[in-house]
Image (cartoon, coloured by chain):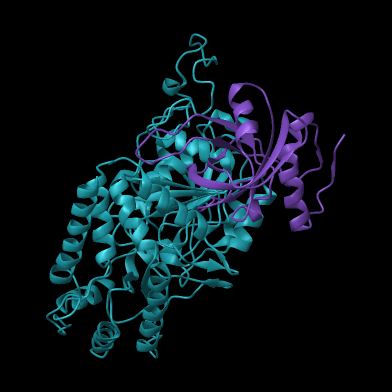
Amino acid sequence: MASPVKIKAVVSEAVHHTGSVASYRFAPQGRVPKFHAGQFLHLALDDYHPDAPWPESRVFSIASSPAKRQEELSVTLSVKGRFTERIIQTLEKGSECWLKLPYGEFLFPPDRHLTLVAGGVGITPYLSLMQQMLEEKSEQAKSIP
Amino acid sequence: MDEANALRSEILQKVKDFYRISHAPGGESFIPGKTRVNYAGRVFDESELVNLVDSSLDFWLTAGRYAEEFSGKLEDFYDVSDVILTNSGSSSNLLAVSALTSEMLGDRRLVPGDEIITVAAGFPATVSPIIQNRLVPVFLDVELGTYNLDVSKLNAALSLKTKAVFIAHTLGNPFNLDAVTAFCEKHDLWLIEDNCDALGSTYRGKLTGTFGHIATGSFYPAHHITTGEGGCVITDDPKLARIIKSFRDWGRDCYCEGGENNTCGCRFTKQYGTLPKGYDHKYVYSHIGYNLKMTDMQAAIGAAQMDKLQAFTDRRKENFRLITEGLRGLEDFFILPQATVHSDPSWFAYILTLQKNVPFSRVGLAQYLDQNLIETRGLFAGNLLRQPGYMNIEHRVVGGLENTETIMNNTLFMGVYPGLTATEINYVTDKIREYTKQF
């Protein structure tokens, strides 16, 4: 995986699906490294400074297209504990936060049919993949039970 | 802090002044027969010095903000997810081959005795990692003119033990990527591109270094950009990248960056090997690795050099064109270099091979040029199998190495690096013409 890059981001859209599930779209304020569908990012709420350790963060699959990474990054999350509760309560359109990416090896082979199985917010890595396939007009067969 | 920032600004301004007085070109002009024409050299301006001193003032020392900037620029340039900085191109080659021995690759991993197809006419660092990993190099001949693998021999080289192809884009000239990638895909082989001499070269409009599973780069001063010592490994496969980083960083399993802890959130919860459950993940080693990292001060130079890459590439191509023009009509004496079909090389050097039966030797020409302060080199190791350290290695040769032998005896190259001017290039070609007129 790439040397993860730390980027300040501004929330460009916040959608609360329920009281405990929300989607966020971020406008990155710095260079976003190339990532692959299926990879994840760290989301931190507190300010980060290069001279200080990375603040507390949690990891979320990237739900947006790798090709549009410089314009937007998005995640969908559900409340699992204290920190995710804080995210839901804190982040709104215009909020600033810090992202660190990319991480992970949950990758999709390009040369075979795929069956994608997910529950709840587990669908997010597939959203990234499907957007990529649409953009590339991929003819790779896929099904989503 | 304000005082520190002010002092830093003052120091960096002084660095610019120092560059202007000590290093800036101008004043000393080329004097034929008095000024040496090197085959390579570092080309830089105040930006490299400023970055270097700026980094030293940080005193971060290990990979830091400049490493992030430099690797980011390389990742964007190659449009890949991962460029892993190392302390040399040779280290990068070692990492590329070692990574393919990882158990994380399952059935596709290389094991001792597996074969890797390569060439003997090149630099030893392409071959030595094969031997160091107890793998067997299978040598094929190269073509004169392109100095790249003769792809017509590939099928004959294939055996049940063949697992990879590892070759360089010789002196910046891309090898036949249509044929080699098709061969690797057909037989499910790994492809490693040694791109150390070819930063900026393209094949069918795509950068070399982006065709194989892994590619390597070098930033030694003779190369297209420099960090002094330094190199990189290039891949668009995050799994391979993680393995490569592990081998680079002592073999560790943890992927936290320097100064970070518990990035995975599982630092004290998992079980590895036969270690007790919860053993600190920071000290779990999944490979027998090395420490081959780049420092931030090297990366600081590289970050500035990247901003000059396009200009360097243009200059290399122009200098190559000028030499070709200057040697026109000497084809009876020399085999002139040929760009591989479909390629646009960012040449590392200008290579010549003496035609058969010319009335002079390579050594004679090299000595004449040396007397006239023109630096030349042979094509690195010549025939690697004749080198003392390689004479007894386990290997196979398929189809003979006739052209490799010719290269060892009759080939030399000279510089096209961006520090050379048209005046110097003309001096070089004039001296070569002058030498041939003696016969």
Above or below for B152 versus B252: below
Q: Position of residue B328 (x, y in %)?
A: 39, 89
In the image, what residue occupies the spot 38% across and 66% down? B407
Horizontal arrangement in the rendering, residue B215 relative to residue B357 (left or right): right
Chain B representation colour: cyan
The answer to whether residue B355 of the structure is visible from this angle is: no
* Residue at x-position 44% and y-position 41%: B95
Q: For this rendering, which residue is in front, A52 or B130?
A: A52
Residue A46, given in percent of the width and then of the height, sits at 49, 35
Q: Position of residue B279 (x, y in %)?
A: 46, 13
Drawn side of residue A24 relative to residue B95, left or right: right
For the N terminus of chain B, the quadrant is: top left
Colour assigned to chain A in the rendering is purple
Q: Residue sitting at 52 percent across and 52 percent down? A: A29
Q: Nearer the viewer, residue B376 or A144?
A: A144
Residue A130: x and y in percent read 77, 47
Looking at the image, can residue B431 be seen?
Answer: yes
- From what the image shows, is residue A114 above or below residue A120? below
A103 is higher (above) or lower (below) than B213: above
Q: How many marks?
A: 0
Residue B121 found in image quarter: bottom left
Which quarter of the rendered picture does the C terminus of chain B lie within? bottom left
Residue sitting at x 60%, y 28%: A86
Image position of A29 (left or right of B410)? right
